[in-house]
Image (cartoon, coloured by chain):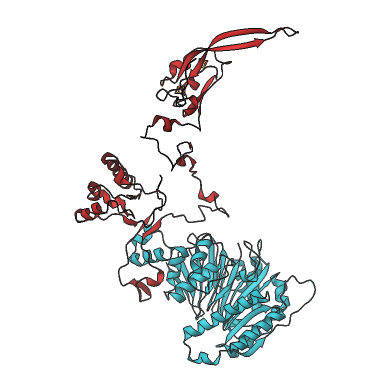
């Protein structure tokens, strides 16, 4: 018998598991041929069956070796759930099923050494998958009706004065502003959590900055992005794109010096400054 | 939706005229109550126009509590009218034991007070009375203000009028301005305080419709002024905002419209006063209203106003003769009280204007 080690990879460690019905399979081999990941193979399985066909008990023992389709337990040739085998099988005998208990990320160490604490590596639930986009009109009571109600999701971003502080004077029955008020922009208040751009590689932040620029300039979407703690690469601080970025200054002081040094060279104002007073979670 | 109506007249009128304006408009939940605010009084209160008038519906205990409070605070009772009801059987009315309308003279030390201080004294007195009555479950106080009378009751308006002898036109209650409404609250609990019109420091307001920004209006208003309480109806928010913009901020009335139904951003950007309008929208975003509604209001100087939501989804019409102007949800009510008016002069206000009727009954349309 083959030796088994506790650290061996099992099928249940993989993100997808093959559900296979040997009784329907005609061994045509199409699935194995179609799998571009070599995730399934033909194997001979030993079976030991005792049957009785007479009206009186007359046990007959069969020892058979039969070919079956079997999933490969490998961290390189693992099933990706592409569904090719299911599509190609003429007998509905095979399909891949998502494995909620996968430990693949943990075992393959794709992302460096195994991390402990913080976010669980076992949790298969993905936040973006559970965002439900629905009509606001169906979520209120009484229900709202787009024809009857005005919807505008823009919100003021900046220091908004209270009405009593507004520097207004009345001239000929009209309000006139006598002094400047702090600048305020009306933005779409859709906020993705601040991500530390300072921790990204040069290529990555260039891509992000270009994406934000593209969304603004080509798609007309008023997207702003926060640097997150850690400051920004000098190249970004001194570029045109800065106007789409909100610089975060946080309690850890990371990246402050870079921001201060870049200030004389900035060609535009940032979209905003976000001062983070407290730190929420520090995984690990 | 409920129907609302108001009349401003050069000749003093009696409540039966307001009832005749309202009754033909019955629809749905209408005619489940009657509430009115009368201003610029003649009749039995005509001698005390500058003295605050208390409007109260209470139990005997409530009347006692009010008397004790007013005595303790040196208000001197002047005139009083306690209607003797017609208690004929079969009337649809959930009457309170007592209805008291009483003029007081200001306490002696009020002589040195400024106008604003007096206004605060009257408001604080009403709020204190309301608290006392609420705690003792002994009644309701609707208004305490010179030349203003409020009556609110639950039941069929025809029967309520019979109960108070309003059909008799006996000359007791006469005024040049009446705002009326014939329905109880249907969205929330039936409480007398929830019935329009509402009154606050000289401002009267009733509204036909709903305010889907009720919660954000309410939360914000609670922090603005001690008089913004109750919130038994979403329409009280319209009154609080009117009071805040006009009385507290002292902005010209046109800006009330800019606060409750701001122009779209694109339109603001085109305007000369875009700086001001943007600043208002920013600072008072939480006073914006939403949903279909029409507002009728009366200002402390007795001018009457009406305006609509930003899509003009609720009806309102202004009809006029030489000595009377009526605002009403539906034209059938106006036809009833002014059948001979020139109908081509009827106004159907649009979503971007405030219609103002001044004390000479001049009708002005102010474009937002
Ligand atoms: S689902 Fe795709 S990867 Fe998985 S076994 Fe079938 S063909 Fe191969
Ligand atoms: S394709 Fe279906 S029938 Fe053919 S070998 Fe694979 S599982 Fe069996």
Residue B237 image point, x, y percent: 53, 67
Residue B114 image point, x, y percent: 46, 87
Residue A91 appears left or right of A127: right
Seen in the picture, residue B360 relative to B20 is either above or below; the reply is below
A201 vs B293, nearest the viewer: A201
Residue B306 image point, x, y percent: 51, 70
Q: Quadrant of residue B207?
A: bottom right
Q: Is residue A266 visible?
A: no
Residue at (62% x, 84% y) in the render: B69
Q: Residue furthest right?
A: B89
B210 vs B16, nearest the viewer: B210
Residue B341 image point, x, y percent: 57, 73
- What shade does chain A have? red
Q: Is residue A161 visible?
A: yes
Q: Quadrant of residue B255?
A: bottom left
Residue A42 appears left or right of B125: left
A209 vs A151, nearest the viewer: A209
Residue B158 appears left or right of A196: right
* Image label count: 0
Q: Which quadrant does the C terminus of chain A fall into?
A: top left
Residue A263 appears left or right of B9: left
Seen in the picture, residue B254 relative to B100 is either above or below; the reply is above
Q: Quadrant of residue B342?
A: bottom right
- What shade does chain B have? cyan
A276 vs A267, nearest the viewer: A276
Residue at (49% x, 24% y) in the render: A11
């Amino acid at each position: 018998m083959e030796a088994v080690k506790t650290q061996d990879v099992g099928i249940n460690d993989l993100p997808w598991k093959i559900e296979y019905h040997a009784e329907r399979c005609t061994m045509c081999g199409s699935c194995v041929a179609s799998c571009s990941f070599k995730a399934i193979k033909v194997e001979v399985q030993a079976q030991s069956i005792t049957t009785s066909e007479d009206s009186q008990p007359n046990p007959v023992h069969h020892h058979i070796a039969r070919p079956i389709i079997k999933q490969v337990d490998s961290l390189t040739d693992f099933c990706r759930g592409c569904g090719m085998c299911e599509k190609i099988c003429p007998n509905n005998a095979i399909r891949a099923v998502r494995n909620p208990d996968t430990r693949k990320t943990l075992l393959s160490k794709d992302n460096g050494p195994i991390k402990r604490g913080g976010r669980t590596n076992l949790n298969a639930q993905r936040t973006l998958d559970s965002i439900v986009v629905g009509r606001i009109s169906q979520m209120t009571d009484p229900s709202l009706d787009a024809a009857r109600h005005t919807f505008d999701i823009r919100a003021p971003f900046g220091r908004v004065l209270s009405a009593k502080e507004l520097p207004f004077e009345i001239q000929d029955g009209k309000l006139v502003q006598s002094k400047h008020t702090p600048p305020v922009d009306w933005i779409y208040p859709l906020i993705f959590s601040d991500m530390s751009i300072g921790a990204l590689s040069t290529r990555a932040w260039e891509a992000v900055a270009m994406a934000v620029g593209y969304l603004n300039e080509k798609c007309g979407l008023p997207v702003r992005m926060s640097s997150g703690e850690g400051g920004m690469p000098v190249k970004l601080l001194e570029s045109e794109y800065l106007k789409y970025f909100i610089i975060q200054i946080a309690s850890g002081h990371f990246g402050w010096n870079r921001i201060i040094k870049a200030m004389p060279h900035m060609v535009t104002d940032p979209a905003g400054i976000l001062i983070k007073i407290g730190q929420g979670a520090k995984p690990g | 939706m409920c129907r609302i109506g108001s009349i401003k007249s050069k000749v003093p009128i009696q409540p039966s005229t307001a009832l005749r304006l309202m009754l033909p408009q019955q629809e749905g939940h209408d005619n489940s109550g009657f509430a009115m605010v009368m201003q610029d009084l003649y009749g039995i209160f005509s001698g005390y126009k500058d003295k605050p008038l208390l409007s109260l519906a209470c139990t005997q205990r409530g009347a006692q509590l009010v008397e004790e409070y007013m005595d303790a605070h040196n208000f001197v009772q002047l005139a009083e009218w306690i209607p003797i009801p017609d208690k004929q059987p079969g009337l649809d009315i959930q009457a309170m034991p007592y209805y008291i309308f009483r003029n007081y003279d200001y306490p002696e030390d009020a002589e040195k007070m400024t106008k604003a201080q007096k206004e605060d004294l009257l408001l604080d007195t009403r709020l204190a009375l309301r608290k006392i009555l609420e705690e003792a479950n002994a009644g309701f106080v609707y208004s305490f203000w010179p030349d203003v009378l409020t009556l609110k009751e639950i039941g069929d308006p025809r029967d309520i009028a019979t109960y108070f002898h309003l059909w008799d036109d006996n000359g007791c209650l006469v005024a040049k301005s009446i705002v009326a409404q014939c329905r109880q609250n249907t969205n929330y609990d039936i409480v007398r305080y929830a019935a329009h019109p509402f009154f606050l420091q000289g401002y009267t307001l009733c509204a036909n419709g709903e305010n889907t920004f009720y919660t954000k209006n309410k939360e914000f208003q609670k922090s603005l002024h001690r008089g913004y309480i109750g919130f038994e109806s979403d329409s009280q928010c319209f009154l609080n905002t009117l009071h805040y913009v006009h009385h507290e901020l002292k902005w010209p009335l046109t800006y009330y419209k800019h606060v409750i139904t701001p122009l779209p951003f694109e339109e603001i950007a085109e305007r000369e006063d875009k700086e001001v309008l943007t600043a208002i929208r920013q600072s008072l975003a939480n006073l914006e209203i939403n949903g279909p509604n029409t507002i009728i209001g009366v200002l402390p100087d007795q001018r009457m106003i009406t305006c609509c939501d930003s899509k003009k989804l609720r009806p309102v019409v202004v009809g006029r003769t030489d000595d009377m102007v009526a605002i009403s949800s539906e034209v059938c009510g106006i036809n009833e009280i002014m059948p001979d008016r020139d109908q081509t002069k009827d106004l159907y206000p649009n979503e971007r204007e405030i219609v103002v009727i001044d004390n000479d009954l001049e009708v002005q349309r102010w474009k937002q």
